[in-house]
Amino acid sequence: GLAFGPIFPTVVGYTFSKISPELFGSAFAIMFAVGLLGATTIPKAIGNFAKGKTIQKSLVILAVTAAILFIIALIFRAV
């Protein structure tokens, strides 16, 4: 949250520059919903994966999530 907090306004601004103004509300709702979905599922997944292991071993989930977000960013950058 602390690291991605400053990025969110940039993502919103960039997205709004790529779509028509009639879709701003829907686009913002989708971005917010995806953000909340990640904020509720990723910590739970890390906690479940860490049961019986160390928390450091479960941080691979964050690495995979970051890689997926990076690939999505590259795809959208090409569009």
Image (cartoon, rainbow, N blue to C red):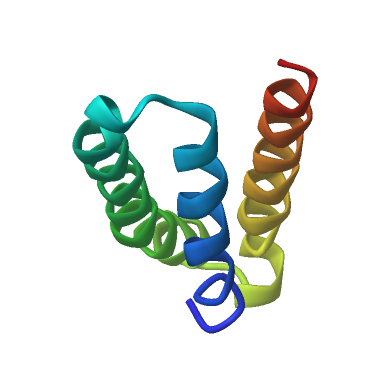
Where on the picture, by quarter, is residue 10?
bottom right
Q: Is residue 8 left or right of residue 20?
A: right
Residue 15 image offset from top left, x and y in percent: 50, 39
Query: Which residue is farthest front?
Result: 21
Q: Is residue 18 left or right of residue 47?
A: right
Q: From what the image shows, is residue 26 above or below residue 28?
A: above
Q: Is residue 35 left or right of residue 49?
A: left
Where on the picture, by quarter, is residue 63?
bottom right
Task: Depth check: give the residue in front, 52 or 60.
Answer: 60
Query: Which residue is farthest bottom?
Result: 2
Number of numbered tags placed on the structure image = 0
Q: Is residue 2 left or right of residue 57?
A: left
Residue 6 image offset from top left, x and y in percent: 56, 76
Task: Depth check: give the residue in front, 33 or 77.
Answer: 77
Query: Which residue is farthest top?
Result: 79
Residue 61 image offset from top left, x and y in percent: 62, 52
Identify the residue shown where x is 66% and y is 64%: 59
Identify the residue shown where x is 41% and y is 65%: 43
Identify the residue shown where x is 67% and y is 36%: 68
Instruction: Indicate the quadrant containing the C terminus: top left, top right, bottom left or bottom right.
Output: top right
Q: From what the image shows, is residue 61 above or below residue 53?
A: above
Task: Depth check: give the residue in front, 61 or 24.
Answer: 24
Identify the residue shown where x is 75% and y is 41%: 70
Residue 38 image offset from top left, x and y in percent: 39, 52
Task: Depth check: give the residue in front, 64 or 54.
Answer: 64
